[in-house]
Image: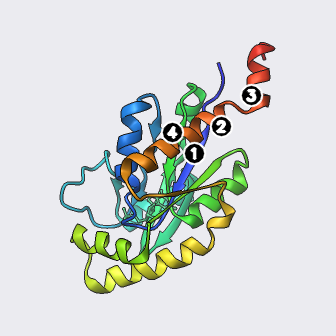
Amino acid sequence: MNRGKTFIISGPSGVGKGSVLRVLLEKRKHIYVSVSATTRPQRPGEEDGVHYHFLDVETFRQRIARDEFLEYAEYVGNFYGTPKEFVDTAMEAGRDVILEIDVQGALQVAAKRPEAILIFIAPPSWEELERRLTLRGTDSPEKIQKRLLRAKVECQTADAYHYFVINDTLENAAAELDAIMTAEHCKSRERMEIINGN
Ligand code: 5GP
């Protein structure tokens, strides 16, 4: 059986990565979406172990010391990291894995695993991103400005990504992601290995 592929999805907070993924998952039910660990406070409606593993800073640092993260980064004052074990288990079982992580984390994974496919999701405009962050109502105005500033910096590094998806509507963005995943599985080397029985 072929190993699954790693798809990394980054994009400014508030751009709607989670919503796009939900639409994609209706079609690709077999995908494993990695659940990150974070030290940021839980938002209303978020479940521990489902949206994130919510950890205190001390526990997060212990896990860094035990080398349990594939990557980790600090983002607007909190730690976020990808637990290695689940990702590897899913890939060995032939499942595609999606990591929804920031640019710093994406570049760490790309350095360790050059076969990973990097996809950047951008908002249709900065005004629209600010509107979405404000509507979400989970961050103070100062935190929203920090997230917007961070988003502009992140977009400048998007040329390190293989693909760029604009989230104008959820359906369009999910369809583009779906197409990218299909195309990656049609790469000639992988297909030739399949017909040659390797
Ligand atoms: P939020 O606080 O809005 O849930 O996430 C803030 C940012 O952290 C988002 O850009 C999200 O992609 C990123 N993020 C979430 N999990 C991880 C992770 O495990 N590693 C890294 N490097 N970034 C993450």
Of the residues shown, which amino acid type is indicated by label 4?
Answer: Asp
Query: Which label lies toward us, 2 or 1?
Result: 2
User: Which circle marks residue 190 in the picture?
Assistant: 3
The type of colouring in the image is: rainbow
86, above or below 131, in the image: above
Q: Residue at x 68, y 30 (%)?
A: 186
Q: CA distance from mark 3 to mark 2?
A: 9 Å
Of the residues shown, which amino acid type is indicated by label 2?
Answer: Glu
Q: CA distance from mark 3 to mark 4?
A: 18 Å
User: Which circle marks residue 7 in the picture?
Assistant: 1
47, above or below 124, in the image: above
Please, what secondary structure does the residue beneath circle 1 have?
Answer: strand
Q: How many residues crowd mark 4 within 10 Å: few (<14), some (14–19), many (20+)?
A: some
Q: How many residues crowd mark 3 within 10 Å: few (<14), some (14–19), many (20+)?
A: some
Query: Which label lies toward us, 4 or 1?
Result: 4
Instruction: Locate the C terminus and report the quarter of the image it occupies.
Output: top right
Mark 4 = which residue? 178
Q: Residue at x 65, y 61 (%)?
A: 107
Please, what secondary structure does the residue beneath circle 3 have?
Answer: helix
Looking at the image, residue 52 sits to the left or right of residue 84; the answer is left
Of the residues shown, which amino acid type is indicated by label 3?
Answer: Glu
Name which of mark 3 and mark 4 comes first in the sequence: 4
